[in-house]
Amino acid sequence: MSAPGRGRRLGLFALLLTLGGSALLVGSSGARLWAENHLPVGALYAAFNRLRPQLNQANGAECFERLRELGVPGRPLSQELMRRENSRERDCPIVNGFAMRWPLAEKRYVTCALAEALYRFYQVDLVPASVRRYGQPVVWIEDAGVRSCRNMSGHRHLRSEHAYANAIDLRAFVLGDGRTIEVASHWDDPEHAAFLREVAAAACARFHVVLTPDSNEDHQDHIHADLGLWKHCE
Ligand SMILES: [Zn+2]
């Protein structure tokens, strides 16, 4: 195809993406129904899904510089490692990956933005809250996973932020004296419920989407926190 022909097709696709994406994401139910019936919805979502990690992870160099200044334990993923990771999971690329060693109990590959938010959440929110409530700092965060190449639960086309290593499921908080406060068993426990709700409220101010056992059946044993494009806390 000639360059002008390709340009016109790209222009048309960009227009469809903009119109269809707007209708699907923020439109009324009528607009969504029209988009579902008249537009290549799967292709639009696929294009949008590919764009999302780039939209989310601008200014990588500045982010890594902030991690360095904060002293976040871990290291940026090398270009080679990122290429390997992203060729294994082509539909779920990590942009600005960071191998975070602590305060997560297990080393995880996360986005730079997620590493920064987690570290600030730990230092500014979790430690003071746990010292106030228990006289002990949280020393480890146990998670139920970061990266998972899948869609949002209940959604046919839209990728989860876990697909891009931009979400974490917080499962438990381990105190300096070894006590462990678990979301699964302590969310409604009179001794720990206030602490876990304080933690969830703090997470809401620091992350974009936060879901808890109060949200739905899928979140009975963890607090989901992500840095995606939407803002929502439950
Ligand atoms: Zn999650």
Image (cartoon, rainbow, N blue to C red):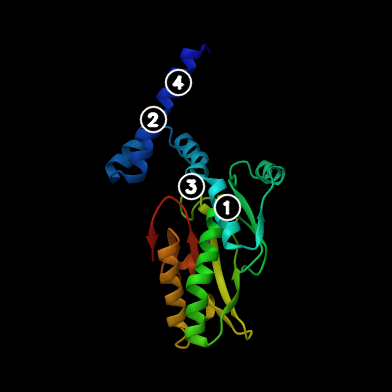
Of helix, strand and loop, which one carries label 4? helix
Label drawn at residue 156: none
Is 219 positioned to the left or the right of 178 in the image?
Answer: left
Marks 3/4: CA distance?
Answer: 26 Å
Label 4, label 2: how many angstroms apart (C-alpha)? 10 Å
Residue 222 in view here:
no
Q: Is mark 3 within 8 Å of ligand 1?
A: no
Q: Residues within 10 Å of mark 1 (few under 14, many from 20)?
A: few
- Asked if disc 4 is less than 8 Å from ligand 1, the answer is no
| Type of amino acid under label 4 | Arg
The spot of residue 212 in percent (x, y) is 45, 69
Q: Which residue is mark 3?
A: 56
- Image coordinates of residue 101 in percent, x first then y, are 66, 64
Quarter of image, res 205 = bottom left
Whichever of labels 3 and 4 marks the residue nearer the N terminus, that label is 4
Q: Residue at x 57, y 74 (%)?
A: 172
Q: Quadrant of residue 209?
A: bottom left
Residue mark closest to the camera, 2 vs 3: 3
Res 16 label: 2
Verify CB contact (< 8 Å) between mark 2 and mark 3.
Answer: no
Of tags 1 and 3, the one toward the viewer is: 1
